[in-house]
Amino acid sequence: RVRPGLPAAARMARREVLLAAIEQSPAELLALAANAAEALQGFSAREVERLSDAIAEHVRTALVTAGPALEAQLEQDSAGAACSDGSVMGALETLTAAAAVARAVATDPSLPVPATLAAVACALHDIIFDLHDPCASTLQAGIVSLCEAWWLADRPGRDELVPQTISYLLVSALHEQATAADVKRLWAWRGALGVLDYSDPSVGALKKLLLHCAIKPLVLRCAEGRKLLVHLFGLHPPFIADLHRAIRAQLPACRKSLREIYGEIYFKAWRAASGPYLDRIEQGCLQDLMFHAVHASSASMSSALRQVLNYTHTQKRQRGVDGALLRLYEPILWRALSVANADVRRNAATVLIEVFPLQDPALPLTQLDELLQRQFDALTALLKDDAVAVRVVAVQGVCRILALYWDLIPSSAATPLLLLLTRDLAHDAAANAVRAAVPAGLKYLLQNGSASSCVGALRGSAAVRSPLSHVAPLVHDTSQRVRTAALDLAIEVAKVRGLNWQTIFRPDALLTRLPLEPPPLQQRL
């Protein structure tokens, strides 16, 4: 160890002694590795080159001696046998020391990196996955640490250290005992992924590891893991389709929280994309999810896909999102709303309600008005649909839209929808589910704070009866489900300032029902 207080000539003499000793014996290299960062301070370019030559010579010898620990295939019985061979263990220690010293040189910006040392790093990199023997695990970790530091320090030849190292980091992050630290380590090395040629068949195994990352819960729950997956969408345009297939296959079985994470990843990947990457993400990923959400054969599958898309739906305030949703949904949604399959119409109605209003601020006002009217016409048609399930979804959706956008919707559109709900659908003789959905939807309309301005329309006037008065007779409905929903609405009306519940729900009619109802409804009355 060189003491800083020594004169320059003495320090140079000590370094000369140290280099001579290292050239003679690998044992001195081990001693240097224990405190390499401090010992290398003040080394000149010539001294670093001389040290690199000595390390290279020891590494060449050690690689030959460590042969038993570098076997490509180890029999179960011989696993760990190399640990009992003193010469093999000595060679492994020499290689570990060489990796440590090379790392110290690479991480010190004041020291140059000779071509000889870069060759040593490359030779060590090439044996990362040949170290199957348990006694070589320390060496394996040391080599990976060297390659990581070499890349992050932007040293010459760093691209040569990527293939094995990135595979090792991926395997570590995918291990059943992996931690968030493994994922963060992989994220820190994300730039190295751009070095590889993903059209080359030799990268096939690594691509499979990347696809496994896309479905690993640990990666998804870690912030750096999610950013890594967003980064993967920008690696190679054809690889986007592979990623999407891997993710889509997980959606039916994974938890809702993971679907929401996937939605965030898709949106952020779309946000960061441009050129061919943007086209593939829009058409191959987002639009594919939209199509299958509308045409799913089961309500549960449609719901799972909408949970993924919901993150994008909720980002409509961000620039460009409205226009993208309109552009991607337009060729799917309008056609699906009029198909013969009732399940598809129900799915399409649900999607339309979730993304309402579909618009593009860049369009002229006349086109925006036409587009908005088209959506109101579609909602009206859905309220009159032949299928009960479609009408139920439409009732719930129209009430939600009126609650959220009452101040923005022209009265010429809002009033007919409200009257269609209260006059017609509240008395739908074909389905009590539809009749129950109307008072439930109106209750939501009254509860929503942004819908306070609609109280005037619901109150009516001396010349026009309150629309809610058409719903009041439902307290006498033959279905208990409908009567319950009607009484819940009456309770909500009583809470709203500006509405006189007694003029809408006659007290004498409610008292008449009191002895006829079961205890739960009696409490409501």
Image (tube, rainbow, N blue to C red):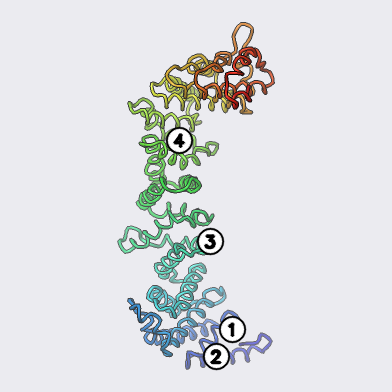
Above or below residue 267? Residue 354 is above
Under mark 3, the amino acid is: Ala
Q: Which residue is mark 4?
A: 325
- The extreme left residue here reads 201
Q: Mark 2 and mark 3 in contact (Cβ < 8 Å)?
A: no
The image quarter in which residue 72 lies: bottom left
Residue 285 seen in the current view: yes
Q: CA distance from mark 2 to mark 4?
A: 68 Å
Kindly report the distance in space between the C-alpha atoms of the residues bearing marks 4 and 3.
Answer: 34 Å
269, 209: nearer the viewer? 209
Q: Secondary structure at mark 3?
A: helix
| Residue designated by label 1 | 39
Spot occupied by residue 253 in the image (x, y as percentages of width and height): 42, 47
- State the image coordinates of residue 449 (x, y, percent, origin top left): 64, 28
Mark 4 or 3: the one toward you: 3
* Disc 2 target residue: 18
**From the viewer's perspective, is 179 left or right of 11?**
left
Instruction: Say above or below: 39 vs 150.
Output: below
Q: Are marks 2 and 1 in contact (CB under 8 Å)?
A: yes
* Callout 4–callout 1 Cβ contact below 8 Å: no
Which is more N-terminal, label 2 or label 3?
Answer: 2
